[in-house]
Amino acid sequence: MIASSTALSACGSDGAAGGAAAPAADVTVAGTHVTRDATLHAFLPAAIRSSGTVRVATDVPYAPFVMFKTEGEPELTGLDYDLGQALGAKLGVRFAFTAQKFEGMVPAIQAGKFDVVMSAMTDTKERQQVLDFVDYSVSGSGILVAKGNPDRIAGLDDLCDKKVGAEAATHQLEVLKAHQAACADAGKGAISIQTFPKDSDAQLALRSRKVAADLVTKPAAGWTAKTADGGRAFEVVEDPAAGGGYEATPNGIGVSKRLPGLTDAIQKAVQALIDDGTLGKICDKYGAASIAVKQATKNAAVS
């Protein structure tokens, strides 16, 4: 399934002097006009400058990071998508998004099919073995439950003895696995972890009460609770001990290690979008202002 990037269109002719592609157009994202920075464009690897395109793998839908504007149509929206369009405009290239199952994105990068991953991916030491991360947010996991919280879930400990959903190959799955020991120490039964290809599948299971909760990133949980059925389907468990979510970690743009110059260029461009307020406005647009960082770091994860 292909989700085509439509927010940016080329200006000028199809080609430019020396065979390089024409620069991407300026865009307005979250109310901010973003223009090309020639200095940042020069940091891009020659192959990217020539093609004029950064090939982006993304997992759709994963609200609020990447979503379809209209179900059944290819046009995308979301925090990561908007950030990609802003980065493309700043760097003078297109960030072309293609839908890919989450667990298949890293292998696809390794196979050379994509240049970067933009899909609310948690920066981890393990993933750093195959990707370099430019970190633009910090967030943890949140517990999404049915409206009214019928099982009275107040935190991770209350997930013991219950069926809980999580998307396959995500950090949230690892959080649930790691909490099994705490369940045992408390004399409670294990969490019955149910994995799903996409979080939208986990939400369907939650709606039908096949699971008691769905563990997702805190921003995704908040967006889903706010928008699903006009806010009448779900709610987020607010644990005072984990305001930003459980095991809050850096999230980043994963870049192929074959393109170290692209990592450097993206890091500089993200910092520029932080400094001019664009990143904060993008995050705020999707109800996630608290996750934006003040400094674009590289490979910030320590575990």
Image (cartoon, grey):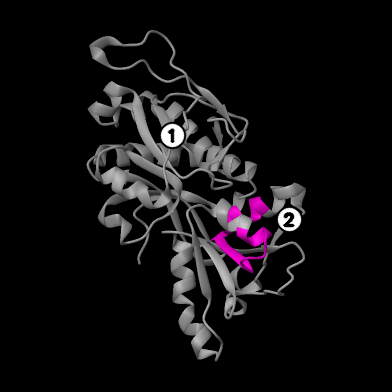
Under circle 2, the secondary element is loop
Asked whether 207 or 247 is in front, the reply is 207
Is 113 placed above or below 150 here? above
Asked whether 228 or 141 is in front, the reply is 228
Earlier in the chain: of badge 2 and badge 1, it is 1
Residue count near mark 1 (Cα–Cα under 10 Å), binned few <14, some 14–19, many ≥20: many
Q: Based on the displayed image, in which of its 4 quarters is residue 209 positioned? A: bottom right
Magenta segment includes 212: yes
Q: Nearer the viewer, mark 2 or mark 1?
A: 2
Check residue 48 in the rendering and tell me which mark sits there, or answer none: none
Give percent across and percent down for residue 98. Answer: 42, 35
Under circle 1, the secondary element is strand
Q: Is residue 36 visible?
A: yes
Give percent across and percent down for residue 153. Answer: 67, 74
Residue drawn where x is 43% and y is 29% of the image: 88
Quarter of the image for the C terminus: give it: bottom left
Kindly report the distance in space between the C-alpha atoms of the residues bearing marks 2 and 1. Answer: 30 Å
The span shown in magenta is: 205-224
In the rendered structure, which amino acid carries the disc numbered 2? Ala
Q: Which residue is mark 2?
A: 233
Check residue 97 in the rendering and tell me which mark sits there, or answer none: 1
Number of callouts = 2
Taking the image as shown, residue 121 lies to the left or right of residue 201, namely: left
Is 276 placed above or below 10 here? below
Give percent across and percent down for residue 58. Answer: 44, 42
